[in-house]
Amino acid sequence: MSLNRSEKEAVISEVTSLAAKAQTLVMAEYRGITVAAMDKLRVNARSNGVTLSVLKNTLARRAVVGSSFEVAGDQMTGPLIYGFSEDAVAAAKVVAEFAKTNDKLVIRAGVYGGKVLDVEGVKQLASIPSKEVLLAQLCGLLMSPISRTAVVLGALAAKKGEGAAAPAEAAAESAAEPAAPAEDAAAA
């Protein structure tokens, strides 16, 4: 079904606004995928903040003109699904994970930072941990020296505590020892 001029302009403006907000674009061929599988992909994408669109390639090319995704214009051929995400790795992760379980979805290309990514580039981008995981790892790295210092100081305090208790015990024992000979002297 062909779109009239106003519908085409609406699609172009919608995709242009998506491209303006997005950091990453992933394109994949969807030939042969069932409707149920496509719905599952869309639900997963939506929950991860990825917008998936099946677009006419000429409209997609027009929509990305002037954006960082314009460099992929020559890759926009054939039946493609376009995944835009504001998170740098979300689109690549969603499409790559789905492609692992469904061989009908074939990753074609991607764009990140104004550079075209081939299939391996998209898979490498998908293997990067999410922002939350990276922040947790960074916090762990920052806390590591502090926690090690706390453990060492705790061990030193415990050792000093043992050392302080030892002289007190020795003084108590030495106080008890003179009392024993005095008792022996008194008994004699």
Image: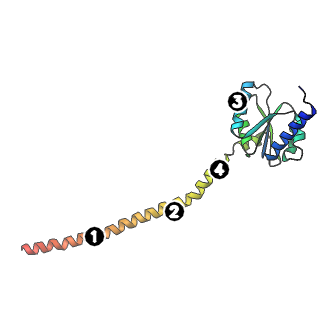
Up/down of 50 relative to 181, above or below: above
Going by the numbered disc 3, the residue's amino acid type is Lys
**Can you tell which of label 1 and label 4 is closer to the viewer?**
4
Q: CA distance from mark 2 to mark 3?
A: 49 Å
Q: Earlier in the sequence, mark 4 or mark 3?
A: 3
Considering only order in the chain, which callout, 2 or 1, is on the residue closer to the N terminus?
Answer: 2
The mark closer to the camera, 2 or 3, is 3
Residue 131, x across and y down, in percent: 67, 48
Residue drawn 33% across the image and 67% down it = 165
Give the residue at mark 2.
149
Residue beneath disc 4: 134
Q: Earlier in the sequence, mark 2 or mark 3?
A: 3
Dot 4: element: helix
- From the viewer's perspective, tell me whether residue 116 is left or right of residue 133: right
Residue 102 can be seen in this image: no
Of residues 184 and 10, the one nearer the viewer is: 10
The residue tagged 3 is 40
